[in-house]
Image: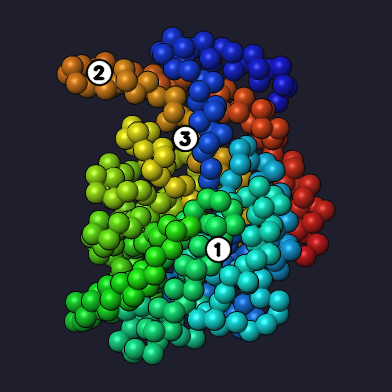
Amino acid sequence: MNEQTVKQSYEIARERYAEQGIDTEKVINQLNEFHLSMHCWQADDVQGFEVQAGALGGGLGVTGNYPGKARNIDELRADILKAKSLIPGTHRLNLHEIYGDFQGKVVDRDQCEPEHFQSWIEWGREHNTKLDFNSTSFSHPKSGNLSLANPDKGIRDFWIEHTRRCRRIADAMGRAQGDPCIMNVWVHDGCKDVSVNHYMYRQLLRESLDAIFEEKLDHMKDCIEGKVFGIGLESFTVGSHDFYTAYAATHGKIPTIDTGHYHPTESPADKVSALLQFVPELMLHVSRPIRWDSDHVTIMDDPTQELFFEIVRAGALQRVHYGLDYFDGAINRIGAYVIGSRAAQKCMTRALLEPTAMLRNDELQGHTFQLLARMEEAKAMPWSAVYDEFCRRSNVPVGDAFIREIESYEAQVTSKR
């Protein structure tokens, strides 16, 4: 898109929004402070770099076999940097434990150390990318259907030790980058068919979490993530939303809202204002479920847009951490990164440009016609011109110009893998 056209469109948008008392310059500054945590596992279909790596399990599945996925740490880093170059703003990188720099050595999950992520810490420093982290309980001979909730004490202790070590790795990352590393704990634990031991499994999970969180660490923040079910574990999920909501509220932990982890009729957006009454912060894993936790690429659909509206309306910009979590192997993987990241940013742009004060007044005055009318008119306001100007100032492609960049990268790099 012509640069002069972008500028002219922005000036018109700036004037339109000023009429509603909205400062678009302030919004662009806020977008610069809106840091997504990009998920490393989109680039290689959740394979990681363990020497002893097995097939993906734990109720997870990646569909599609588009050519060119990253095969090693260098290719994955290159792909992430390419994606970041097409997304305005500065962003974090979210790593799973299986993405350690293991140097061709067998390192079991209960033996991982900060040294296995030192090269990631240095890479992050070099590329102005802060790191977040996840323990990895799936795709391992000791995963089975139960990890932290396993009645077998040996297996349970293995995963407790793994998660303890992951917290120390996250703490080392946070200390090195001068900003807390956000570490997420999600375990797949559940049952495929009828179970009568729900209470026992949840008691074991609670006790495991208590043991894991015993050590106080100052440079990381703990998140816990629930789910409705996983494939092959459809009948019962130990770490349900009720379980983790109660645990987070009573232990000062951060609940993770994964938009794919709810019943199709539930609204993740509505949980923002509810949870923030009782917990200090929230973590988001933004994806797009189609009928189930299918992890399609994030787009500007209604549920995603409403999620960001609710964060802004709650005045919670500084209390929410923003991560992406999808793994689509059916399309160009760098393209998936860029589409999903820019979609999340566009949703935030619209949310920041909403005339919230005016809408609140309408609602409190009982002006329901005016409220609905203004909300409908806001949909047609030139928010995209503000996002385009944000892209222009960030020196990244405006509009669909990023498509050509990705096609060129595919022709020169990923197609030759």
**How far separated are the C-alphas under marks 2 and 1?**
47 Å
Tell me the quarter of the picture where residue 94 sits: bottom right
Residue 333: give x, y in percent of width and height.
64, 55
| Crowd rating for badge 2 (residues with CA inside 10 Å; few <14, some 14–19, many 20+) | few
- Looking at marks 2 and 3 on the same chain, the residue that comes earlier in the sequence is marked by 3
Residue 100 position, x and y percent, is 62, 70
The quarter of the picture where residue 384 lies is top right
Q: Which residue is mark 1?
A: 172
Residue type at tag 3: Met
- State the residue at coordinates (79%, 47%): 408
Question: What coloring was used for the rendering?
Answer: rainbow
- In the displayed structure, does residue 53 sit left or right of residue 317? right
Q: Which mark is residue 348?
A: 3
Q: Does 135 appear above or below 193?
A: above
> Compared to 308, does 256 lie above or below?
below
**Secondary element at tag 3:** helix
Whether label 2 touches label 3, CB < 8 Å: no
* Disc 1 packing (10 Å; few <14; some 14–19; many ≥20): many
Question: Is tag 1's residue or tag 3's residue first in the polypeptide sequence?
Answer: 1
Is disc 2 placed on a helix, strand or loop? helix
Residue position for label 2: 361
Identify which amino acid the numbered label 2 is placed on.
Asn
Q: Secondary structure at mark 1?
A: helix
Tell me if label 1 and label 3 are in contact, CB under 8 Å: no
